[in-house]
Amino acid sequence: MTRPLFWSLILLSASAIGPAAYAQQTQDAAPTPANTPTAVAPAAAPPASATSAPTASPAPRDISNLPTVSATTLKKARDAGYRMKVRHNAVVFCKKVTETGTRFTTDVCMDENQLAQVLMREQAQRDEMANRSTCTGCSGK
């Protein structure tokens, strides 16, 4: 009879402490008027969106200095599941890969030269597997 009483007290104390700890975290994260550096705008001022252009859209990216990618490389990359991205003013090809033993996907990115090497290696592996399946009675060259 003491065991159920013990667990009910544990459950009651956990339910009482949980919301208080959560409320304390949200109060710390919420900005207070004393902590905010900007002053409150007067009520008579017009809204900012009516007087100025919206700033939500990012500035257009300058693509004139990016290296060009050949159409055949782009087609091979798309066929292999890679997408072209621009990172640090360089063209990279990225593919979402799931690592063995986990369900999390990560982006694997590489430049054009690395992509060409990976595509050649994958094609060589496909060719080797195709030759093995057609030559079942071969001596093993």
Image: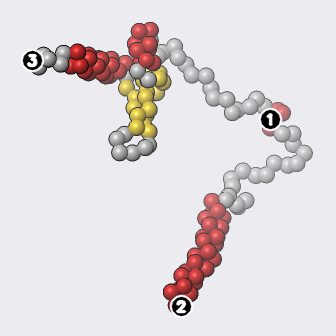
Looking at the rendered structure, the secondary structure element under dot 3 is: loop
Q: Please report the residue visible at 87 percent of the width from the left and 39 percent of the height from the top.
A: 46
Residue 30 percent across, percent down from the top left: 67, 59
- Point out the tag, 1 or 3, that comes first from the N-terminus: 1
As drawn, which residue projects farthest toward the left? 139
Where on the picture, by quarter, is residue 125? top left
Residue 94 percent across, percent down from the top left: 43, 27
The residue where tag 2 is placed is 1
Where on the picture, by quarter, is residue 120? top left
User: Mark 3 belongs to which amino acid?
Assistant: Ser
Q: Label for residue 139?
A: 3
Q: Nearer the viewer, mark 1 or mark 2?
A: 2
As drawn, which residue projects farthest toward the right? 44
Q: Is residue 77 above or below residue 105?
A: above
Q: Please report the residue visible at 14 percent of the width from the left and 17 percent of the height from the top.
A: 137
Give left or right: position of 82 versus 16: left
Q: Nearer the viewer, residue 34 or 69?
A: 69
Q: Please report the residue visible at 35 percent of the width from the left and 45 percent of the height from the top.
A: 101
